[in-house]
Image: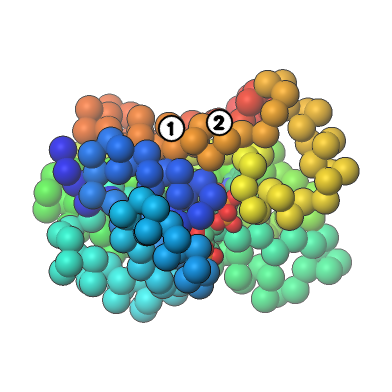
C-alpha cells in the first residue's frame, strides 16, 4: 500500500539503502538530511525520492518539517529514525558539547519525530516506527560513552513507546546494526577496522542493504504482531 514514509538521514549510507528499499516496497518515501546538499541532490536525481533538509535533533525544525511533509504528501505512517552521528573520545577528552550533540541527534531525534507523528498514526490506526540503534548501544564501546548511551537509550525508548502504540495499531521496533560499510565506518582507522572485521563471524562488514531488508520486514503492513523488539543485524558479532 502507498503509505508515506520518512527516513531521517535517508540520503546517504544506511538511510539511503532504507529509502530505496521502502520505495521498492511501494512506500511513498521522503528522505531527510542535515546539510550535505550535494549528496541529497544526487540521491534525488538517481532515485526520484524527494529530500528535505532539517536538523532531526531540533524540535522546532522537526515541527516545521513534519508540517511541510504532511501538507505536501499526507500524514507520515512509516517513520525510520536513522539519522545519527558520532563524536568519539574517551571520558577524559569528551566535552559536554560532544555529549549533547550525540544525545540530541541520535536519541532526541527519536523523541522529536515520534512525538510529532504519533497522533497522525493514531488517527489512521496504523503506524510503523523503526529506530536505528547500534551494536555499541548493546555492548558498549571504548571512547563512545555518548554514542553508547544514546543508542542504548533508543532501545529503552522503543520498548516503552511500543507499549503505548500497541492498541492503536502502531508498532515500534529497533534495529541494532553491527559494523556497516558506510562513511561513518570508513572514518575508523584501517588497523582498528581490520581488528573489528576479524571479530565478525560472518567475516565481513555489513552492507547498508542488509539493514534495509530488516526495515522493510519490520514496517510491512502485515507486521502488526511484531512490536517492542530489537533486531540485531551484525554478522553474528554480538548475540544479545
Ligand atoms: P552516515 O554518516 O553515512 O549518514 C548519516 C546520515 O544522517 C546522513 O544522511 C546525514 O545527513 C544524516 N544526519 C546526520 N545528522 C543529522 C541531523 N542532525 N539531522 C538530520 N539528519 C542527520 O551514517 P550511517 O549510514 O553509517 O549510519 C546511519 C545510522 O546507523 C546512524 O544512526 C548510525 O548511528 C547507525 N549505525 C551505523 C553503523 C555503521 O556501521 N555504519 C553501525 C550501527 C549503527 P547529511 O548527508 O546531510 O550529512
Residue drawn at x 63%, y 26% as measured from the top left: 235
Residue lying farthest to the top in this orientation = 201
Relative horizontal placement of residue 51, taking residue 205 as reference (left or right) = left
Q: Is residue 168 above or below residue 96?
A: above
Q: Is residue 155 visible?
A: yes
- Tell me where residue 222 appears, x and y as whole percent: 22, 27
Mark number displayed over residue 233: 2
- Tell me where residue 175 appears, x and y as whole percent: 49, 38
Residue drawn at x 70%, y 74% as measured from the top left: 96
Q: Is residue 42 above or below residue 177?
A: below
Q: Quadrant of residue 232?
A: top right
Relative horizontal placement of residue 117, taking residue 14 as reference (left or right) = left
Relative horizontal placement of residue 151, taking residue 159 as reference (left or right) = right
- Tell me where residue 153 appears, x and y as whole percent: 54, 51
Secondary element at tag 2 = strand
Secondary element at tag 1 = helix
- Tell me where residue 63 appears, x and y as whole percent: 30, 73
Q: What crowding class fits label 1: few (fewer than 14 Cα within 10 Å), some (14-19), or many (20 or more)?
A: some
Mark number displayed over residue 214: 1
Closer to the N terminus: mark 2 or mark 1? 1
Which quadrant is the C terminus positioned in? top right
| Quarter, ligand 1 | bottom right
Circle 2/circle 1 CB separation < 8 Å: yes
Amino acid at each position: 500500500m502507498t503509505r508515506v514514509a520518512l527516513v531521517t538521514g535517508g540520503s546517504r549510507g544506511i538511510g539511503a539503502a532504507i529509502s530505496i528499499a521502502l520505495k521498492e516496497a511501494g512506500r511513498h518515501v521522503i528522505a531527510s538530511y542535515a546539510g550535505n546538499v550535494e549528496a541529497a541532490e544526487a540521491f534525488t536525481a538517481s532515485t526520484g525520492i524527494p529530500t528535505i533538509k532539517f536538523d532531526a535533533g531540533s524540535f522546532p525544525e522537526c515541527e516545521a518539517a513534519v508540517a511541510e511533509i504532511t501538507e505536501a504528501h499526507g500524514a507520515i505512517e512509516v517513520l525510520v529514525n536513522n539519522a545519527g552521528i558520532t563524536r568519539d573520545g574517551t571520558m577524559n577528552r569528551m566535552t559536554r558539547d560532544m555529549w549533547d550533540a550525540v544525545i540530541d541527534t541520535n536519541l532526541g531525534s527519536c523523541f522529536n519525530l515520534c512525538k510529532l507523528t504519533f497522533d497522525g498514526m493514531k488517527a489512521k490506526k496504523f503506524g510503523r516506527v523503526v529506530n536505528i540503534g547500534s551494536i555499541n548501544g548493546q555492548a558498549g564501546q571504548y571512547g563512545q560513552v555518548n554514542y553508547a548511551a544514546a543508542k542504548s537509550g533508543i532501545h529503552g525508548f522503543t520498548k516503552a513507546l511500543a507499549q503505548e502504540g500497541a492498541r492503536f495499531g502502531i508498532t515500534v521496533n529497533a534495529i541494532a546494526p553491527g559494523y556497516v560499510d558506510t562513511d561513518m565506518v570508513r572514518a575508523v582507522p584501517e588497523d582498528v577496522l581490520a581488528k573489528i572485521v576479524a571479530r565478525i563471524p560472518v567475516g565481513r562488514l555489513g552492507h547498508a542493504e542488509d539493514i534495509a531488508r530488516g526495515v522493510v520486514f519490520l514496517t510491512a503492513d502485515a507486521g502488526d504482531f511484531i512490536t517492542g523488539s530489537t533486531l540485531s543485524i551484525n554478522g553474528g558479532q554480538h548475540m544479545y
